[in-house]
Image (spheres, grey):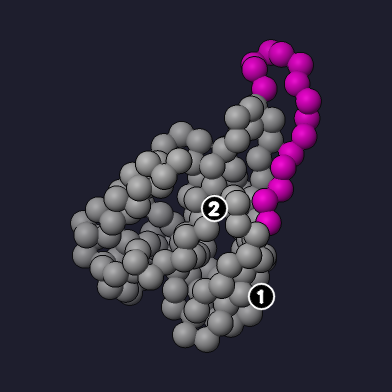
Amino acid sequence: MWVIRLVVMVAVATSLGACAGYPLAKSPSPGNRVAGSPGVAHDAVVVTEQDRTAAVRVGQTLLLELHAKPGMTDWNGVTSSDTSALTPLTIDVMVPRGLTMAAFEAVSQGQVTVTAVAGALCPQGQPCSAYAVLYSLRVTVGPG
């Protein structure tokens, strides 16, 4: 598991270097770049599906690494309950199958819930249980 995380972080770091410190774009406009330094990845708060709470400061990036469980689909529908406090960003790197990554910029203080869903991975044409799993992360955005 740590190898995948290391590979992803190297890919993000490489992307940061290639983009001269402008690694992430605010959604949905890819032309709207986040002004930052090459050290953005070092200051990012990284959380996984194991985490239920996180704390970030205004100006920091929250990076979600959600790993699909066996028999489940990849995580999708990653959203912030308050985009005025935690704004979604677009990640410009490819990730391995089974890993969903999402990034958010902390822009104002507040309490925010980030959610994602996954479902059963059903073989095509076979009966399958219909269920969904909800991931929920409570994020506290503090002063910068």
Q: Which mark is residue 111?
A: 1
User: Element type at marker 2?
Assistant: strand
Prevailing secondary structure class for the magenta stretch in the rendered image: loop
Q: Amino acid at mark 1?
A: Gln
Q: Residue 48: which disc? A: 2
Within 10 Å of disc 2 (Cα), the crowding (few <14, some 14-19, many 20+) is some
127 magenta-colored:
yes
Q: Position of residue 129 (x, y in %)?
A: 78, 25
User: In percent of the image, x 50 and y 50: which residue is there?
Assistant: 65
Q: How many marks?
A: 2
Of the residues under marks 1 and 2, which one precedes in the sequence? 2
Q: Quadrant of residue 37?
A: bottom left
Q: Magenta residues, as a range?
A: 122-136
Up-down relation of residue 134 to residue 137 (above or below): above
Which residue is found at the position 46% from the left and 34% from the top? Answer: 97
Q: Is residue 70 above or below residue 139?
A: above
